[in-house]
Image (cartoon, rainbow, N blue to C red):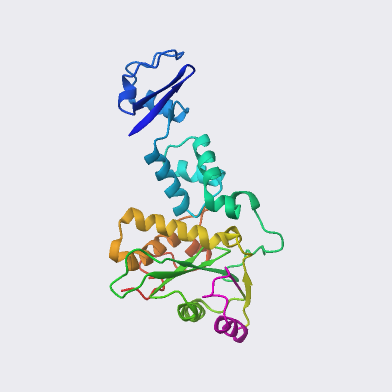
């Protein structure tokens, strides 16, 4: 892993391993024969600049986790025991084209578009995940993710295409499994913004709210859930098995305790047992 050593008199190229014996001329401390802990501390203090490979890795995590703001992104990295400095995270977020174009990290809440909800199964957020690089054995490349905005409880449904049909299937399954809900939040994608979905909402008494264009943070609950699911699939190296593994990842996410203590499944008032299977027309 090649990195650059930095001191007051200039810069030198060195690898993490070579840093244990590198002579950083002019530095206040003697860095010769440094141990693992000391070198790691040097990295964290900014004494070593990230290589392109490490910058690409940091950028990939930022994208997989849904373009989190720098503060939340830094906290997530620390939780996952991934070592980057605050300056490196700030610099990467500032150079992210998506964040700069949509100003995800700067806009914050969009006035008039956020409705607070503390009651389970009253507000649902829907978003589409995909297309995936590899299709399942059934030819599925997409997944619709539904998230209860009060509890974080999530449900997934895989599909071959991204249009109104799987969205309607998901809405019917949600109503059948857990009952009616009064409010639905989605982005402005054509799979959500069409006559068939609007007719369904009118027939079932559901208010459909669209996120403002270029503000994915307005539907951040679904965006964050998709980021977590993608990260889990990557860690599991799902490949063609990503369909059933996505359902499994959703189950694990619903069983994971939140910051307040109870898991999303417990907040929903459902039995907290791992044998229950989430909705998902996967193989």
Is 193 covered by the magenta stretch?
A: yes
In the rendered image, is residue 263 in sight? no
Q: Is residue 222 above or below residue 198?
A: above
Q: Is residue 253 above or below residue 13?
A: below
Residue 127 on image: x %, y %:
51, 67
The N terminus - image quarter: top left
Residue sitting at x 52%, y 63%: 222
Residue sitting at x 63%, y 49%: 106
In the rendered image, is residue 4 in sight? yes
Q: Residue furthest right?
A: 112
Residue sitting at x 66%, y 56%: 109
Q: Is residue 15 left or right of 212 when viewed as pictured?
A: left
Q: Is residue 40 left or right of 240 when viewed as pictured?
A: right
The C terminus - image quarter: bottom left
Residue sitting at x 38%, y 56%: 232
Identify which residue, 70 or 206, lies in the foreground: 70
Classify residue 81 by image quadrant: top left
Q: Is residue 252 above or below residue 57?
A: below
Classify residue 30 by image quadrant: top left
Identify which residue, 160 or 114, lies in the foreground: 160
> Which stretch appears magenta?
184-204
Residue 173 on image: x %, y %:
47, 79
Is 227 covered by the magenta stretch?
A: no
Residue 251 on image: x %, y %:
40, 64
Give the mark count.
0
Q: Is residue 175 above or below residue 30?
A: below
């Amino acid at each position: 892993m090649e990195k650059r050593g930095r001191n007051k008199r200039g810069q030198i190229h060195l690898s993490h391993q070579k840093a244990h014996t590198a002579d950083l001329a002019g530095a206040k401390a003697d860095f010769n024969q440094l141990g693992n802990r000391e070198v790691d501390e040097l990295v964290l203090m900014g004494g070593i600049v990230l290589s392109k490979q490490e910058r690409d890795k940091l950028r990939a995590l930022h994208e997989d986790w849904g373009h989190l703001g720098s503060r939340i992104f830094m906290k997530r990295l620390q939780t996952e025991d991934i070592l980057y400095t605050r300056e490196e995270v700030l610099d990467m977020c500032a150079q992210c084209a998506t964040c700069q174009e949509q100003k995800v990290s700067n806009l914050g809440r969009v006035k008039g578009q956020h409705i607070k909800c503390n009651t389970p199964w009253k507000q649902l957020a829907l978003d589409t995940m995909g297309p995936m690089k590899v299709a399942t054995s059934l030819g599925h490349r997409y997944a619709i993710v539904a998230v209860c905005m009060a509890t974080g409880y999530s449900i997934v449904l895989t599909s071959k295409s991204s249009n109104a049909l799987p969205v309607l299937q998901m809405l019917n399954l949600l109503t059948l499994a857990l009952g009616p809900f009064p409010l639905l939040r989605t982005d402005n994608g054509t799979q959500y913004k069409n006559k068939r979905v609007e007719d369904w909402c009118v027939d079932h008494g559901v208010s459909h709210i669209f996120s403002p264009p270029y503000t994915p943070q307005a539907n951040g609950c679904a965006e964050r859930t998709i980021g977590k699911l993608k990260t889990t699939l990557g860690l599991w190296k799902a490949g063609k098995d990503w369909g059933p593994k996505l359902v499994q990842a959703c189950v694990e996410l619903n069983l994971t305790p939140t910051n307040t203590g109870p898991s999303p499944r417990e907040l929903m008032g459902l039995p907290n047992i791992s044998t229950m299977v989430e909705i998902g027309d996967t193989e």
